[in-house]
Amino acid sequence: MKNLSFQFLRFIAAGAINTFSTALISTLLNKALAYNVSFVIGYAAGIVISFFLNCLFTFGKRPTLKKFMLFPLSYVPNFAVQYLSVVLLVEKLCLSSTLAYFLAAIIGVPVTFIVMRFVIVKTI
């Protein structure tokens, strides 16, 4: 349990870096593209950043092509939750897209940790 707690704390730190990177990319793209398109592109870039951060920093595992290919699947549940959150926060609550990106990321944290841990640690 102690190792799991330590991994979760490292996951939060990696997630903070990844969330900032994703939101920055999305916000910069938002100047030229619609907020939802900017979110999708930023999110895709964040998946690549997250893969390397979580393999090396969070779980201490060597990145492999197989893990890299499976890794985006760990984001499918999170993407659904975050995308719907961004749309609802922007369109229903009239929040800025930048704030919506950050709030949606926080909402998806527990889902992502559980699925990602399985993909990175349990993948042979």
Image: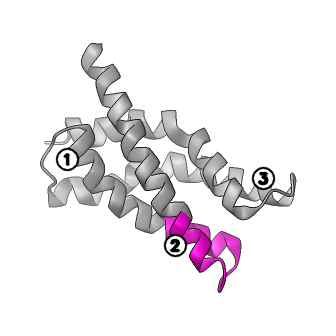
Q: Amino acid at mark 3?
A: Leu
Q: x and y percent of residue 62 in the render?
A: 12, 48
Q: Is residue 74 left or right of residue 55?
A: right
Q: Residues within 10 Å of mark 2 (few under 14, many from 20)?
A: some
Q: Which residue is mark 3?
A: 89
Q: Nearer the viewer, residue 112 or 22?
A: 22
The Cα–Cα distance between marks 2 and 3, rounded to whole angstroms, is: 19 Å
Q: Nearer the viewer, residue 18 or 43?
A: 18
Q: Nearer the viewer, residue 21 or 72?
A: 21
The way the protein has been coloured in the rendering is: one colour
Q: x and y percent of residue 14 in the render?
A: 37, 45
Q: Residue visible at 49% across and 53% down? A: 19
Evaluate if marks 1 and 2 touch, with contact meaning CB atoms under 8 Å apart: no
Q: Secondary structure at mark 1?
A: helix
Q: Earlier in the sequence, mark 1 or mark 3?
A: 1
Q: Residue visible at 30% across and 54% down? A: 51
Residue 77 part of the magenta-drawn span: no
Q: x and y percent of residue 88 in the render?
A: 78, 53
Q: Which residue is mark 1?
A: 56
Q: Which residue is mark 2?
A: 41
- Give the number of the mark in front: 1 or 2: 1
Evaluate if marks 1 and 3 touch, with contact meaning CB atoms under 8 Å apart: no
Q: Secondary structure at mark 2?
A: helix
The stretch in magenta equals 24-43
